[in-house]
Amino acid sequence: KDVYLQIIDRLGVKDGSHADDIRKAGFDAFHYRNIKETINLFSDTDFLLTKLRSLYRLYLVTMGSLDTQKQKVKMLNLDKYFDKIYFVDISKETNKSNAFKQIMAENNAKPDQCLSIGNRIDSEIKDGKLLAMKTILVEHGEYVSLKPAGPEEVADAKIHELSELYELLLK
């Protein structure tokens, strides 16, 4: 069920109260916004991504409103760390699978040669697992309380801080 409809249900919005309008307003307010606040990378991100980029091909797959996601990428200066950035338009797609498939196709890579790292079990982990990719869950941020709905949402490994990623990859 749509997360915004779940919130509406939890808040007790009654049928006939235009729940779909409320859901759409919440969705749009979150996804289609100008980023006004200052956003920063975690303190260890620059070192980690620079180091990983020297060892691996790195790709960023981000999903949301194209304008909002592009603002975030620019504000964080992320393009210097990644071979390519894939923007998945949330108004047209419901997951990152097609972007993952495109990365594999463009690199002639097999799923077991790819790793999906993210903080959402219902997105990066699930989409990666369904394509037979290895996955690492970063247990940090607003999605940390999500519980797996099935085995496809259980990551192959978990970390709490990005700094743990480098050591994990060296094993």
Image: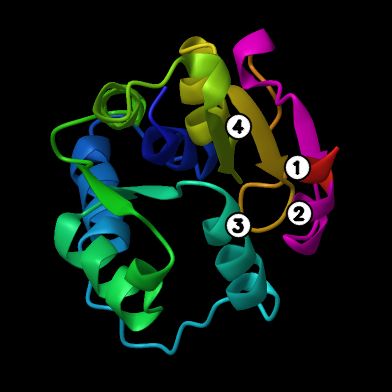
* The magenta segment: 150-167
The residue type indicated by label 4 comes to: Ile
The residue type indicated by label 1 comes to: Leu
Residue projecting furthest to the front: 54
- Determine the residue positioned at 78% across, 32% down: 157
**Colouring rule applied to residues:** rainbow
Front position among marks 4 and 3: 3
- What SS does tag 4 mark? helix
Real-space Cα separation, disc 1 to disc 3, in angstroms: 9 Å
Whether residue 159 appears in magenta in the rendering, the answer is yes
User: Which numbered tag is attached to residue 169?
Assistant: 1
- Residues 62 and 163: in front is 163
Sequence-first tag of 3 and 2: 3
Q: In the figure, 16 relative to 41: above or below?
A: above
Front position among marks 4 and 2: 2
Task: Give the image location of residue 58, x and y in percent.
Answer: 45, 49
- Residues 63 and 113: in front is 113
Report crowding for label 4: few under 14, some 14 to 19, many 20 or more residues within 10 A (C-alpha): many
User: Which numbered tag is attached to residue 159?
Assistant: none
Q: In the figure, 141 relative to 86: above or below?
A: below
Real-space Cα separation, disc 3 to disc 2, in angstroms: 8 Å
- Determine the residue positioned at 82% across, 55% down: 164
The residue type indicated by label 2 comes to: Tyr
Whether residue 148 is visible to the viewer of this picture, yes or no, is yes
User: Which numbered tag is attached to residue 121?
Assistant: 4
Residue at which label 2 appears: 166
Quadrant in which the N terminus is drawn: top left
Kindly check if marks 3 and 2 are in contact, taking CB atoms under 8 A apart as contact: yes
- Determine the residue positioned at 46% across, 13% down: 131
15 lies left or right of 170: left
